[in-house]
Image (cartoon, rainbow, N blue to C red):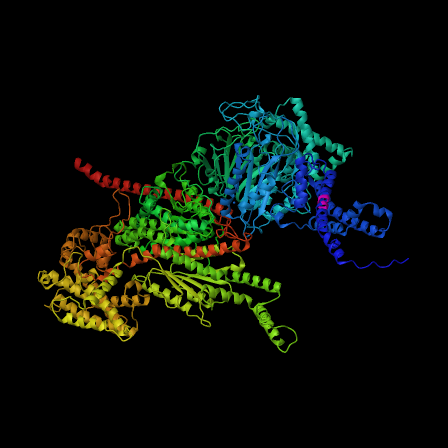
């Protein structure tokens, strides 16, 4: 029956109807999916755990506690992973591999099966949907039928396939684990559906705060070690294994590695810390596991484990930075072997702990009272136990070759051989992993199976079956074979122990008789087994082992191979402990090594460090109970920054704090040295070492807690001294600087420290400190060296090197400027600056590496005991550090300039004289900057440059103090130059303060215009760099908004205006709007950039691409260092805000190298020399020309944006901005002349007159002249002629200054004073000299001795009248020259003159000075006639000088004595003092015989008087007697020179005499100020860009500008020269140097002996009468 349809519901019924079932169940569906997803994930992880319990019986497959269950559920539900911890006995060989594969793949198979099963059930359920059974169970319908549940199952299965099958791991886990457990360092399976270390001897570091402060200290060590390179890093630590051990057995421990590969913008120290916390710390609280466990704390058993962390940061050299190549390295995975544990000889004999000393774990409390009833030493019985074996190595250096059976094999061959010998695939291709493999073969003490493998691999080379270990056809026995053979050895040992009643293995170790009996017993047993095997009654295992062994050992006892094999196995069993293993390896290895070797057999009580060609230091902190080690010397000082955690602990500590200063031991990396640290275990306070090393001295440190044993591998270079003499005190040592505290911006902190550091260097130099002692020693060496050249004992030729300066990168650039200045001052001194890498390439290898493109070779660098200065701020860079060793083969006078006294270079130099080293032979110059981890170098460069300035002054003072030294070196520097330089040096601090914005006390200075100007320029350039990133964000926002709303800009406006796409006649406008919107989308980034530039007021014509910054400066070190600084600032920036940095010399190659790269928007910053100084005017003009040329290259009206930084306040017309630094030094004489001319101009403008003479002619002329200059025009502008006249007036004033020579207290030249002037013959000649403008002594002498008959009659008119005519003449000449040049200066003060204007002014002054000195009138200096006349004059001058010499030589003996010289020179200038005459005579007397010969006299006559005056009265000591350059106290430089100069020397000539001091000011001070200004500007750029990305990404993006991608602040890698080659060559050269020295000594003694013999023979023959004389005497007697 068909029912009728129901009526439609009413409105009221509709309103009260229930909601739609679909909408009401939406929330429940989401909940069902989420819950199902979590449950399926939990089931997936349970499947892993279940299968693990089947394959790994001893694994942690059962959740024994509620905490374990909670952790498992939390990981499974929240992290979708589980951790399965495996005990050491399960982590063995192929069984572990099979278990891992089964556990891994079972999970995804299970999840997929669950999903498919549920899907099938749902399908079946849908077929039976109408049955009664299906309607009864709602749970079945929910769990099986709902499709959402099946979807959750499939999602879980897909995740499982992705992670377990395909191996894709979530990103956050990739940094915390190794996705390949086969190569994992830990026995934890994780399933996802430069050396450093620390020993915590004091348990308070663990049990008080859970090890947090210890991890802080470890992180600090990693941060410092990162300076050596930090692309990856890792740490290994040891923990007790799950299975226990009996009371009298060695502990069973396992190693846990935590390794991290650093990303480009992450910090490795934090990454390593985070990885350790995940692997070694508990989930709650991040406390170290075992922090409250008895195993790591004092306990009743007296056995406590010492927590140690052994780490390494890596800078990849032999491969890419990867997890496999990250240290610590392990070749063979953990495997259990039968072991016989060893202990110290004293403990084996049953001795108790000595009174007054204790070992860790003895049960002694801090107060010395017992915490246990038994104080006796734990005695290890001679019984075997099963111990998990794993060896870990951290290595800094290069492993190149290893010797096996007398032959060397390279690393690649060794790696292939290890895979065969160990039967383990190569875990990594890096060379350090091969060292771990070698340790697996060598560390065999206590295990017969491993000892047998050692004997087969290393000791059977001379047997009858001599095989090539690299033969690929040779198959080595397996570990199982060795274990079978080892059982024979173990059985024999057990039988002897029971038979002989041996109580410890020490009896075998120390008794040759027992060893021989054991060898004999084992040999007999093996022969017996061989005989049994021949009858085929031997078991399958032993037969297989013999078959594998027969390829290496002949089992015929008569051939001797078997006995040799047994003997080698037994010796290795007893001798190859940790120290002997390292010793064997380094003896046969070739390369450079900084090693840390730890094993699971020894880590409970000892560790070994070794250094050979790589540095390594160990620090001991007795008060804190810490031992730190690191390759970077500064890293071990981290213990100074942390104190022991204070708080309550349930365990306390058994470490007795000792009130001793912390000390550091630096291993001898030159000869090679091994150190064993043994802190004991179970009351055993003596070191456990094998018999071969028992004779080594044992030193107890840390209050007797730690035993230290040193082993020197070689002693080729210097003798080893006692340990206590080698220890460097870290605490209460003024030479040791602690590490700096962490800060947010290390680059800014470095820049702010610049004034303080420079001020401290100067103050320290003025005091009696380390630098002064080193300077005294350097001065002694320089005097000895130059005296040798004076005496002739040292040959003087072109290739001779007197002073050699070397370094790398920024240190080398600063050193090159230092050498350039030194060579300029002493042209005849052999000074060279050579890169350390070039020195190592030339002299550090047997086959020299040529320096192509450089004039350096072993022939051009003849180094016979030169003075060597090594500049290395870090003191640890490989090149300079290797040179500090290599140069000891050539020189005994080696010095270093470093950041502090305590550096690696300093250590090498301090050990040159062994125990005889003292402060009087100090070789270290220290900037006291300390460790600066920021890679962009600022304060380190400036401090090095500052210290080199002080060293430069000291060298100059040392040389110019001796006239013979001045002559032999060709010195051109004077005491006045040094005083000027020192005044500028001290005033430089104030300039640096104004640039940096912080004073020398560290206080910020506010309202600094120049500092703000530099920061503002940095802000503008930062906006240039960020504009693309900001435009990208603006484009992103625009696209998201417009696309989401559906209304682009133009279309939206059109829509709002009523335009619709409704097929109306105007619909084409709608499409036109869309077309414009499409254009906006296409050009959107460019539009946004244009908008940003409009809003920020920046140039609109720049190209919209990545920016390039070009840095230019005439001082090469400034441009190079600034380029390195800026490029490192932006090394880690994102590509959208990247920067390309270039540099060049604007006075040389910048135009040729970079102007073709100039585009619109290129950024160009250039340093300008101070052109106000005559010596630098042309240099500034060249620099400005280069800037103008670069800025003149235009495209559509746009060009590069150039900024100049300098002191001359004249902006270039084509530059974007000129930043003018403040000048805090006094004026030089040339500046003073310009200032005086400006003041005279102003005075003339105010008074409308020049009141110079008593007559009215000149006054009228100048009144007319001034009235013309100040004529006004209609527009108020000054006519060009008037502007030119103003400058010419200044030139006229300068001419007046050159015409009159006055002293400071001299009255104006009036007619009355003129009448009082003496007019004798001397004055007449002097006045003639003045009129000629003579500037050297030759002119004065000629005018004095030739006579006055050829002189024109002396005019009777006044000097003022002469000056009036000369002023008018020069004024007209200046106007004509200025008009012809078309150059005028419209500025009113000399500080605003352009370089071109200054060049014109100084050129005119120079021409005028030359005109005055020319007797024949005014000539063009470039005219051929002028040149010929000058040459004729010079020739005649020589002839006249010869005639004068004969006139002065009254006694006609061919020489002039001091009396004759004094009488003659008094005729020239009666006012000269006797002190000046003595100094001049001493300067001229080159040979020092007290007389002047003709050559010396001629050289003296050609010497400028100003230079002579500069060498008079050299005062180079302060009130305390210290050799010190005293600063000039003049109001302006040259004031004293001007006042004391002989009459006739022109003022401009005196100004020109300051040329050298001006150049030194530029290279030492002004250039430094420009570099600091650039760092301030560049830091602002980098800081703005760095802070931008965290702001716009809410902290997700970001980087640190104090780091680069390579993270290598100190290049310690042996590049480009091998460290092994350097070391071997160094030893060879040193031995050759010693032999040659001995040969020379013997030869000299032999020659002296022969000479004495000849003299004696001659004397005897002279005294002895001849035979004829005797006969004559006899006849007469008769």
Can residue 404 be seen by looking at this rendering?
no
Front residue (pair 1524, 1236): 1236
- Looking at the rendered image, the quarter that the N terminus falls into is bottom right
Range covered by the magenta-colored residues:
39-43
Front residue (pair 1116, 610): 1116
Front residue (pair 780, 587): 780
Assess whether residue 507 is covered by the magenta stretch: no
Q: Is residue 1502 left or right of residue 510?
A: left
Q: Is residue 400 left or right of residue 182?
A: left
- Looking at the rendered image, the quarter that the C terminus falls into is top left
Instruction: Pinpoint residue 1667: horizontal percent, then vertical percent.
Output: 24, 40
As displayed, is residue 1100 above or below residue 61?
below
Quadrant for residue 276, please give it: top right
Can residue 1618 be seen by looking at this rendering?
yes
Instruction: Pinpoint residue 417: horizontal percent, then vertical percent.
Output: 64, 45
List the single residue furthest toward the right.
1
Quadrant for residue 81, please give it: top right
As displayed, is residue 939 above or below residue 1397?
above
As displayed, is residue 1285 above or below residue 761?
below
As displayed, is residue 123 above or below residue 1092?
above
Instruction: Pinpoint residue 1061: horizontal percent, then vertical percent.
Output: 64, 73
Front residue (pair 1005, 360): 1005
Magenta part, dominant SS: helix
Instruction: Pinpoint residue 1178: horizontal percent, then vertical percent.
Output: 33, 65
Q: Is residue 834 left or right of residue 1053?
A: left
The total of numbered circles placed on residues is: 0
């Amino acid at each position: 029956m068909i029912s009728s349809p129901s009526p439609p519901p009413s409105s009221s019924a509709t309103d009260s109807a229930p909601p739609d079932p679909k909408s009401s169940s939406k929330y429940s569906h989401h909940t069902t999916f989420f819950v199902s997803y979590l449950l399926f994930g939990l089931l997936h992880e349970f499947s892993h755990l279940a299968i693990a319990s089947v394959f790994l019986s001893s694994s942690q497959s059962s959740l024994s506690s509620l905490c374990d269950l909670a952790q498992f559920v939390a990981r499974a539900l929240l992290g979708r992973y589980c951790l399965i911890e495996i005990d050491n006995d399960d982590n063995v060989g192929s069984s572990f591999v099979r278990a891992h594969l089964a556990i891994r793949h079972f999970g995804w198979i299970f999840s997929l099966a669950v999903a498919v099963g549920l899907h099938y059930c749902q399908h079946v359920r849908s077929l039976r949907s109408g049955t009664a059974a299906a309607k009864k169970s709602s749970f079945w319908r929910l769990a099986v039928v709902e499709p959402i549940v099946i979807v959750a199952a499939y999602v879980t299965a897909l995740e499982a396939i992705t992670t377990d099958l395909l191996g894709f791991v979530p990103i956050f886990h990739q940094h915390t684990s190794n996705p390949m457990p086969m190569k994992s360092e830990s026995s934890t399976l994780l399933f996802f559906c430069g050396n450093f270390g620390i020993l915590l001897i004091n348990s308070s570091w663990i049990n008080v705060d859970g090890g947090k402060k210890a991890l802080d200290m470890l992180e600090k060590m990693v941060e410092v070690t990162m300076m050596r390179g930090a692309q990856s890093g890792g740490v290994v630590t040891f923990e007790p294994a799950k299975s226990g051990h009996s009371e009298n057995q060695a502990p069973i421990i396992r190693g846990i590695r935590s390794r991290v590969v650093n990303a480009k913008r992450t910090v490795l120290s934090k990454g390593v810390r985070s990885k350790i916390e995940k692997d070694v710390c508990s989930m709650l609280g991040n406390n170290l596991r075992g922090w409250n466990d008895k195993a790591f704390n004092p306990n009743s058993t007296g056995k406590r484990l010492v927590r140690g962390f052994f780490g390494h940061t890596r800078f990849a050299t032999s491969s890419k930075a990867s997890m496999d190549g990250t240290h610590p390295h392990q070749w063979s995975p953990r495997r259990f072997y039968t072991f016989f544990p060893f202990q110290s000889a004293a403990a084996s004999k049953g001795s108790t702990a000595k009174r007054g000393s204790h070992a860790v774990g003895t049960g002694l409390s801090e107060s010395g009272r017992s915490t246990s009833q038994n104080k006796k030493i734990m005695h290890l019985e001679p019984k075997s136990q099963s111990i998990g074996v794993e060896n870990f190595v951290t290595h800094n250096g290069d492993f190149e070759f290893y010797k096996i059976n007398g032959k060397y094999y390279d690393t690649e061959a060794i790696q292939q051989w290890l895979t065969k010998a160990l039967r383990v695939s190569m875990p990594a291709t890096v060379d350090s992993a091969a060292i771990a493999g070698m340790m697996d073969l060598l560390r065999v003490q206590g295990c017969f199976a491993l000892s047998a493998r050692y004997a087969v691999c290393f000791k059977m080379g001379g047997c009858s079956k001599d095989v090539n270990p690299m033969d690929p056809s040779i198959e080595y026995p397996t570990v199982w074979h060795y274990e079978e053979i080892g059982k024979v050895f173990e059985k024999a040992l057990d039988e002897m122990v029971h038979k002989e009643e041996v109580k410890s293995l020490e009896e075998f170790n120390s008794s040759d008789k027992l060893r021989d009996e054991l060898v004999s017993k084992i040999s007999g047993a093996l022969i017996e087994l061989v005989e049994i095997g021949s009858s085929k009654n031997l078991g399958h295992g032993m037969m297989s082992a013999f078959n594998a062994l027969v390829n290496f050992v002949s089992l015929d006892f008569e051939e001797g191979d078997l006995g040799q094999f047994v003997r080698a196995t037994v010796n290795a069993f007893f001798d190859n402990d940790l120290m002997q293993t390292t010793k064997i390896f380094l003896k046969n290895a070739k390369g450079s090594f900084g090693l840390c070797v730890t094993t699971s057999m020894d880590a409970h009580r000892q560790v070994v460090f070794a250094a050979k060609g790589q540095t390594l230091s160990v620090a001991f902190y007795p008060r804190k109970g810490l031992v730190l080690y690191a390759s970077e010397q500064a890293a071990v000082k981290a213990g100074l920054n942390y104190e022991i955690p204070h708080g309550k602990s349930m365990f306390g500590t058994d470490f007795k704090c000792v009130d001793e200063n912390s000390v550091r031991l630096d291993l001898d990396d030159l000869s090679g040295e091994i150190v064993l640290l043994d802190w004991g275990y179970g009351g055993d306070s003596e070191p456990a070492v094998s018999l071969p090393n028992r004779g080594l001295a044992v030193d107890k440190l840390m209050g007797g807690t730690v035993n230290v044993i040193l082993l020197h591998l070689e002693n080729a270079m210097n003798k080893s001294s006692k340990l206590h003499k080698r220890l460097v005190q870290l605490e209460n040592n003024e030479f040791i600087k602690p590490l700096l505290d962490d800060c947010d911006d290390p680059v800014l902190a470095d820049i702010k420290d610049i004034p303080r550091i420079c001020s401290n260097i100067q103050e320290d130099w003025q005091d009696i400190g380390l630098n002064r002692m080193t300077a005294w020693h350097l001065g002694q060496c320089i005097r000895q060296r130059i005296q040798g050249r004076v005496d002739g004992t040292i040959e003087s030729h072109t290739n001779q090197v007197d002073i050699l300066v070397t370094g790398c990168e920024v240190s080398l650039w600063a050193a090159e400027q230092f050498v350039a200045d030194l060579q300029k001052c002493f042209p005849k001194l052999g000074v060279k600056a050579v890169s350390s890498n070039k020195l190592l390439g030339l002299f550090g290898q047997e086959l020299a590496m040529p320096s192509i493109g450089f004039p350096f070779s072993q022939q051009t660098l003849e180094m016979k005991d030169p003075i060597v200065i090594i500049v290395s701020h870090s003191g640890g860079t490989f090149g300079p550090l290797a040179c500090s060793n290599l140069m000891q083969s050539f020189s005994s006078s080696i010095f270093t300039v470093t950041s502090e006294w305590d550096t690696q270079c300093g250590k090498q130099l301090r050990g040159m004289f062994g125990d005889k080293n003292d402060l009087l032979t100090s070789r270290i110059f220290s900037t006291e900057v300390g460790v600066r981890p920021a890679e962009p170098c600022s304060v380190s460069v400036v401090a090095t440059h500052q210290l080199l300035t002080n060293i430069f002054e000291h060298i100059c003072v040392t040389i110019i103090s001796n006239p013979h030294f001045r002559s032999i070196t060709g010195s051109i520097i004077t005491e006045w130059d040094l005083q000027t330089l020192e005044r500028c040096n001290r005033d430089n601090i104030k300039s640096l303060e104004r640039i940096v914005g912080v004073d020398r006390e560290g206080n910020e200075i506010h309202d600094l215009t120049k500092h703000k100007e530099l920061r503002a320029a940095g802000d503008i350039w930062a906006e240039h760099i960020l504009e693309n990133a900001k435009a990208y964000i603006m484009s992103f926002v625009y696209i998201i908004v417009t696309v989401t709303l559906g209304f682009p800009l133009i279309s939206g406006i059109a829509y709002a205006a009523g335009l619709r796409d409704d097929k109306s006649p105007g619909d084409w406008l709608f499409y036109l709007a869309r077309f414009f919107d499409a254009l906006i989308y296409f050009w959107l980034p460019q539009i946004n950039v244009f908008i940003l530039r409009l809003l920020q007021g920046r140039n609109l014509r720049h190209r919209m691409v990545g920016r390039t910054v070009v840095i230019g400066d005439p001082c090469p070190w400034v441009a190079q260092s600034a380029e390195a600084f800026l490029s490192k600032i932006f090394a880690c920036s994102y590509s959208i805000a990247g920067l390309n940095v270039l540099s060049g010399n604007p006075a040389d190659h910048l135009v040729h190298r970079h102007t073709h790269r100039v585009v619109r928007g290129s950024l160009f910053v250039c340093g300008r020399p101070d052109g106000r100084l005559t010596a630098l005017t042309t240099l500034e003009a060249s620099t400005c020309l280069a800037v103008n040329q670069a800025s003149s290259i235009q495209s559509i009206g746009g060009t590069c944006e150039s900024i100049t930084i300098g002191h001359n306040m004249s902006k270039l017309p084509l530059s974007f901005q000129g930043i003018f630094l403040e000048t805090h030094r006094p004026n030089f004489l040339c500046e003073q002349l310009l200032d005086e001319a400006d003041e005279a101009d102003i005075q003339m403008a105010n008074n409308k007159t020049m009141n110079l003479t008593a007559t009215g002619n000149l006054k009228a002329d100048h009144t007319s002249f001034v009235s013309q200059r100040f004529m006004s025009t209609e527009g108020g502008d000054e006519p060009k002629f008037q502007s030119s006249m103003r400058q010419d007036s200044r030139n006229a004033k300068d001419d007046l200054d050159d015409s009159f020579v006055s002293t400071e207290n001299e009255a104006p030249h009036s007619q009355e004073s003129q009448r009082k002037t003496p007019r004798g013959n001397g004055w007449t000649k002097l006045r003639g000299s003045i009129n000629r403008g003579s500037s050297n002594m030759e002119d004065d002498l000629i005018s004095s001795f030739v006579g006055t008959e050829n002189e024109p009659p002396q005019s009777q008119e006044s000097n003022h009248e002469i000056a009036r005519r000369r002023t008018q003449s020069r004024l007209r000449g200046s106007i004509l020259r200025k008009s012809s040049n078309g150059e005028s200066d419209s500025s009113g003060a000399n500080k605003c003159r352009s370089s071109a204007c200054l060049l014109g002014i100084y050129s005119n002054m120079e021409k005028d000075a030359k005109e005055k000195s020319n007797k024949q009138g005014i000539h063009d200096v470039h005219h051929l006639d002028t040149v010929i006349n000058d040459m004729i004059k010079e020739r005649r001058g020589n002839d006249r000088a010869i005639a004068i010499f004969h006139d002065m030589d009254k006694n006609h003996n061919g020489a002039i004595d001091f009396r004759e010289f004094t009488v003659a020179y008094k005729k020239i200038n009666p006012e000269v003092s006797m002190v000046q005459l003595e100094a001049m005579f001493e300067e001229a007397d080159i040979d020092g015989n007290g007389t002047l010969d003709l050559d010396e006299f001629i050289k003296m006559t050609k010497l400028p008087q100003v230079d002579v005056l500069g060498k008079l009265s050299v005062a180079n000591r302060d009130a305390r007697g210290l050799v010190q350059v005293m600063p000039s106290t003049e109001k302006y430089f040259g004031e004293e020179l001007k006042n004391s100069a002989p009459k006739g020397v022109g003022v401009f000539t005196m100004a020109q005499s300051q040329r050298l001091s001006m150049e030194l000011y530029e290279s030492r001070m002004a250039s430094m100020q420009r570099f600091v200004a650039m760092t301030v500007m560049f830091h602002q750029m980098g800081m703005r860009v760095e802070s931008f990305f965290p702001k716009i990404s809410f902290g997700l993006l970001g980087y640190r500008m104090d780091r680069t991608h390579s993270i290598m602040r100190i290049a310690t890698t042996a590049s480009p020269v091998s460290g092994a080659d350097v070391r071997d060559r160094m030893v060879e050269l040193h031995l050759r140097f010693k032999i040659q020295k001995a040969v020379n000594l013997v030869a000299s003694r032999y020659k002296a002996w022969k000479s004495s013999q000849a003299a004696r023979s001659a004397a005897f023959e002279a005294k002895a009468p001849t035979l004829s004389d005797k006969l004559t005497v006899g006849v007469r007697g008769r």
